[in-house]
Image: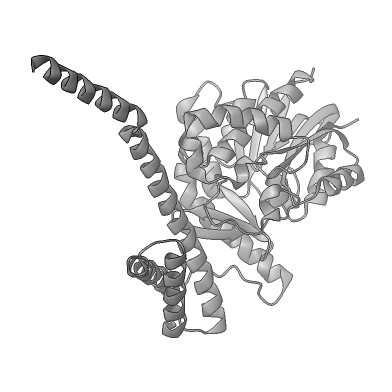
């Protein structure tokens, strides 16, 4: 009798052991649920971005924000999709009703604040002036948090910044004369401060007084020893670069700045003028042939800080729940070749970056096992010309 009980207990333990082996890990399931929930939240954020664009259109066309017949038709469609997916249609209808209500609230809120519309006014001049005002509004709000936001958010942009930094170091290594470097479109001076470690003098130029003020304060507080060798000046580069002929050893336009300048052809001629013979440059542009723009639309927020709006032909910058449309023109690799050839500068190498990372949902990069291999993949793809940014390097002969 005792022996039979022992056998039963052993059998029970054996079955329990087997069950533990075949059951999924509860901690892993919890991690998967958190990833899905985060993705759902990101998708909802993307939906609210589109809701704001819908409000812009309705305001211009003088249409009502709440259109009950259309919303009812959407809810009916959601029930059909729910049924096809094996979900409770009433459950999905209740959730989506709240989503639609929040979308309408976002539209009403934006309508009341009357955000300047990123639409084309009467003339190109007026439109460009509007985009420039949007840029100044954005940078005034963003300047105090600019460095912090880039350090913690937008993983694909962070990957790009590191890749670009390695290329800049490579270009600097070719220079004998390391007297003066220019950072065109310097923002808060993250790149400028790095350049100051290699050059006797560095000048950072940006159209935004708010960014320049922040850049000056950062260098003053964080690195007072270099404060005297780094200068920041607020200036619109379309009116010229305030340096003498044959003065600069190195010129940088990073993070797509080349696309942010409307009259880039004249700026490139200015770059050639201020560079010393043998001086080098690195310039970054948005890539019209990038993989991200072939999709036309991504339903999730991208891990890039900004993306070209191929419909309105501008750059949509996401900041604190608002979208600021500013001037930006994407170029093809062949167009960059042509621009540099006409300016008289010599192109020595060209890359695009990042490719795959630019189209992935942002929360994927929270996984440590993804970031390392993804950087290696992106580097291998950088010469296939599908990356979000074009990086052009060369010299003045």
Colour mapping: one colour
Query: Which residue sits furthest top?
Result: 3
Q: Position of residue 231 (x, y in %)?
A: 61, 34
Of the pair 309 and 267, the residue shown nearer to us: 309
Q: Is 389 on the left-hand or right-hand side of 95? A: right
Of the pair 275 and 256, the residue shown nearer to us: 256
Query: Which residue sits furthest left?
Result: 1
Of the pair 108 and 282, the residue shown nearer to us: 108
Q: Is 262 on the left-hand or right-hand side of 32? A: right
Is residue 177 depicted above or below 50 in this figure? above
Q: Quadrant of the N terminus?
A: top left
Occupied quadrant, residue 67: bottom left
Is residue 94 depicted above or below 171 in this figure? below
Q: Which residue is drawn at 45% across and 61% down?
A: 85
Q: Residue at x 38, y 67 (%)?
A: 96
Is residue 230 depicted above or below 334 in this figure? above
Q: Residue at x 78, y 38 (%)?
A: 384
Of the pair 359 and 250, the residue shown nearer to us: 359
Residue 278 in view, yes or no: yes
Q: In which quarter of the image is the C terminus?
A: top right
Q: Where is residue 187 in the image (x, y as percent from the top left)?
A: 58, 42
Q: Position of residue 120 (x, y in %)?
A: 66, 72
Residue 164 in view, yes or no: no
């Amino acid at each position: 009798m005792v022996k039979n009980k022992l056998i039963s207990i052993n059998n029970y333990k054996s079955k329990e052991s087997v069950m533990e082996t075949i059951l999924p890990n509860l901690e892993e399931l919890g991690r998967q649920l958190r990833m899905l929930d985060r993705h759902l939240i990101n998708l909802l954020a993307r939906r609210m971005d589109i809701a704001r664009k819908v409000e812009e259109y309705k305001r211009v066309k003088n249409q009502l924000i709440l259109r009950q017949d259309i919303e009812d038709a959407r809810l009916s469609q959601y029930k059909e999709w729910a049924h096809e997916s094996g979900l409770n249609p009433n459950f999905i209808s209740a959730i989506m009703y709240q989503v639609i209500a929040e979308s309408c609230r976002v539209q009403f809120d934006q309508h009341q604040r009357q955000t300047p519309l990123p639409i084309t006014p009467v003339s190109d001049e007026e439109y460009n002036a509007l985009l420039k005002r949007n840029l100044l509004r954005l940078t005034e709000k963003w300047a105090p948090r600019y460095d912090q936001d880039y350090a913690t958010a937008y993983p694909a942009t962070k990957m790009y910044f590191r890749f670009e930094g390695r290329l800049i170091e490579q270009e600097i290594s070719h220079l004998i004369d390391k007297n003066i470097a220019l950072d065109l479109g310097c923002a808060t001076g993250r790149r400028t401060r790095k350049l100051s470690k290699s050059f006797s003098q560095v000048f950072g130029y940006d159209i935004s007084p708010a960014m320049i003020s922040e850049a000056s304060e950062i260098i003053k507080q964080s690195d007072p020893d270099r404060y005297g060798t780094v200068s920041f000046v607020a200036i619109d580069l379309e009116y010229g670069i305030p340096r003498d002929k044959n003065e600069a050893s190195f010129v940088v336009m990073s993070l797509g700045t080349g696309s942010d300048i409307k009259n880039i052809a004249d700026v490139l001629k200015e770059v050639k003028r201020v560079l010393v013979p043998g001086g080098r440059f690195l310039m970054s542009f948005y890539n019209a042939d990038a993989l991200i723009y072939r999709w036309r639309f991504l339903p999730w927020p991208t891990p890039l800080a900004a993306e070209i709006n191929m419909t309105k032909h501008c750059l949509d910058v996401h900041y604190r729940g608002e979208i600021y449309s500013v001037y930006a023109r994407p170029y093809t690799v062949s167009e960059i070749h042509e621009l540099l050839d006409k300016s008289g500068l010599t192109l020595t190498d060209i890359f695009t970056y990042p490719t795959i990372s630019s189209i992935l949902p942002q929360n994927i990069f929270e996984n440590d096992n993804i970031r390392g291999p993804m950087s290696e993949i992106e580097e291998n793809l950088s010469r296939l010309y599908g990356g979000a940014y074009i990086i052009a390097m060369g010299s003045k002969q």
